[in-house]
Image (cartoon, rainbow, N blue to C red):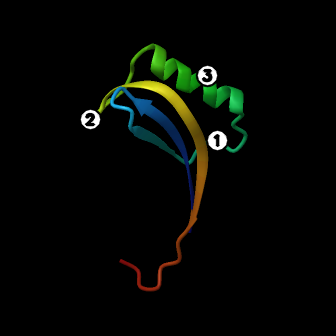
Amino acid sequence: MLTKRLELIFQNLAGRRTTLAVQDPRENLTETEVRTVMQLILDRNIFTSPGGDLSAIIGARIVTRDVTDIIAA
């Protein structure tokens, strides 16, 4: 089964990376849309992390994973 997720990567106040994941992102996402949402998350201080509030945008990526079950659970 093929799955995709959008990973939004931020730096927190402790200087560590924090990743937010969105399952099954829309196929036609643009860099501008992703950057705008990430900046909104920072501006409104929507999320926090064990290392404190999110403080900077590091990057974003779409991760695709293909899993084949040999024995179904």
Q: Nearer the viewer, mark 1 or mark 2?
A: 2
Q: x, y percentage for residue 46?
A: 39, 21
In-front residue for pair 61/30: 61
Q: x, y percentage for residue 70?
A: 47, 85
**Three-letter residue code for mark 1:** Arg
Residue neighbourhood size for the residue with mark 1, other residues' Cα within 10 Å, grouped as few (<14), some (14–19), many (≥20) = few
* Secondary structure type for disc 3: helix
| Alpha-carbon span between mark 3 and mark 2 | 24 Å
Residue 36's disc number: 3
Q: As drawn, which residue projects farthest toward the top?
A: 43
| Alpha-carbon span between mark 3 and mark 1 | 15 Å
Residue neighbourhood size for the residue with mark 2, other residues' Cα within 10 Å, grouped as few (<14), some (14–19), many (≥20) = few
Look at 50% across and 38% down and name the residue there.
9
Q: As drawn, which residue projects farthest toward the front?
A: 15
In-front residue for pair 71/19: 19
Look at 72% across and 34% down and name the residue there.
30
Question: Looking at the image, do the residues carrying marks 3 and 2 touch, with CB atoms under 8 Å apart?
Answer: no
Q: x, y percentage for residue 41?
A: 47, 22
7 up-or-down from 4: above or below:
above
| Alpha-carbon span between mark 1 and mark 2 | 29 Å
Q: Earlier in the sequence, mark 3 or mark 2?
A: 3
Question: Looking at the image, do the residues carrying marks 3 and 1 touch, with CB atoms under 8 Å apart?
Answer: no
Q: x, y percentage for residue 38?
A: 54, 26
Q: Earlier in the sequence, mark 1 or mark 2?
A: 1
Residue 5's disc number: none
The N terminus: image quadrant:
bottom right
Left or right position of 45 against 2: left
Look at 48% across and 79% down and name the residue there.
69
**Three-letter residue code for mark 3:** Thr
Residue 26's disc number: 1
Q: Which residue in the protein does label 2 denote?
A: 50
17 up-or-down from 5: above or below:
above
